[in-house]
Image (cartoon, rainbow, N blue to C red):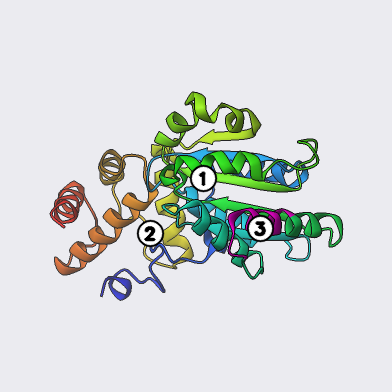
């Protein structure tokens, strides 16, 4: 087992690691600042990026850190739904027993959101992940759903998260009205080489493992193989640790990284 071999108390490169150990890349810091703005100025935010760059993680971390007495957070990830199914899912998340007709469901949702904002003084924040899969009719309805008091009030915040193709979708003329309502946007660029080097070192520290087990060349090889994705980097690093343990090596070099990458590529 590589944990005992390298003196680690846990695998610091596991995706299930506690959020208190989260590593603040430039991406995460920028997104955190923009989400903080959204807390004070309700509206629509758009966050895009390739898979594995930390989009979902950063949004979940933001939501988990909000005061539940002040914010009602809803996270929706099943994006390939019909309009009625989408409304029903949203209604249930708001604690509503859904009506059967779409028009009644729409009224229920808007009334409930207004009740949270006006009477309970709670801001509703709805995040739709993998939003690039949303049907056109749902995207059109989002524009209507955010329309309160003749479009003069924002009673809740909507966060759209998806892959870069989502920008292309929203740039279509049919979605121009929704695009104009977006007040915050950011496209994730992923982890840099310098950040990856710092990340690996700090991960080993928090796990109380052996230090300096990755050579500078191996870190560069990991970076060149991960496409700026921390998720991919974690997979490669974990595989490196497993292979090094099997071969009884104390230092992870380029050869180990290459073997790890090839093993993962082969599935």
The image position of residue 76, as x and y in percent, is: 52, 57
On residue 138, the disc is 1
Tags 3 and 2 touching, CB below 8 Å: no
**Mark 2 / mark 1, whichever is N-terminal:** 1
Q: Report helix, strand or loop for mark 3.
A: helix
Q: Is residue 222 left or right of residue 50?
A: left
Q: Position of residue 34 (x, y in %)?
A: 65, 40
Q: Is residue 190 left or right of residue 106?
A: left
Asked if residue 106 lies in the magenta stretch, the reply is: yes
Residue 122 lies, with reference to residue 7, above or below; the image says above
Report which residue position mark 3 lands on.
104
Residue at 84% x, 58% y is 121
Q: Residues within 10 Å of mark 2 (few under 14, many from 20)?
A: some
Q: Which secondary structure type mostly characterizes the magenta part of the structure?
A: helix
Which residue in the protein does label 2 denote? 211
Find residue 9 and report its image quarter: bottom left
Q: Say above or below: 242 vs 60.
A: below
Label 2, secondary structure: give it: loop
């Amino acid at each position: 087992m590589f944990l005992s071999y390298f003196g680690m108390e846990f695998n610091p490169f596991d995706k299930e690691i506690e959020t208190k150990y989260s590593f603040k890349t430039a991406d995460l810091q920028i997104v955190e600042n923009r989400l903080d703005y959204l807390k004070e100025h309700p509206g629509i935010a758009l966050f895009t990026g390739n898979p594995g760059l930390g989009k979902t993680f950063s949004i979940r971390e933001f939501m988990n850190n909000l005061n539940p007495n002040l914010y009602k957070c809803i996270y929706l990830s099943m994006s390939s739904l019909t309009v009625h199914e989408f409304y029903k899912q949203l209604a249930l998340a708001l604690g509503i027993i859904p009506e059967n007709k779409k028009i009644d469901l729409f009224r229920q949702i808007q009334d409930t959101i207004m009740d949270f904002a006006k009477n309970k003084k709670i801001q509703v924040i709805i995040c739709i992940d993998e939003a690039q899969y949303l049907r056109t009719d749902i995207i059109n309805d989002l524009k209507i759903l955010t329309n309160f008091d003749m479009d003069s009030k924002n009673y809740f915040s909507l966060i759209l998260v998806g892959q870069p193709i989502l920008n292309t979708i929203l740039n279509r003329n049919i979605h121009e009205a929704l695009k104009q309502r977006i007040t915050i946007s950011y496209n994730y660029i992923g982890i840099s080489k310098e950040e990856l080097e710092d990340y690996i070192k700090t991960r080993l520290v928090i796990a109380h493992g052996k230090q300096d087990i990755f050579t500078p060349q191996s870190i560069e090889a990991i970076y060149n193989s991960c496409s700026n994705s921390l998720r991919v980097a974690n997979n490669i690093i974990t595989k490196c640790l497993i292979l090094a343990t099997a071969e009884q090596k104390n230092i992870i070099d380029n050869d180990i990284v290459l073997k790890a990458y090839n093993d993962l590529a082969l599935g």
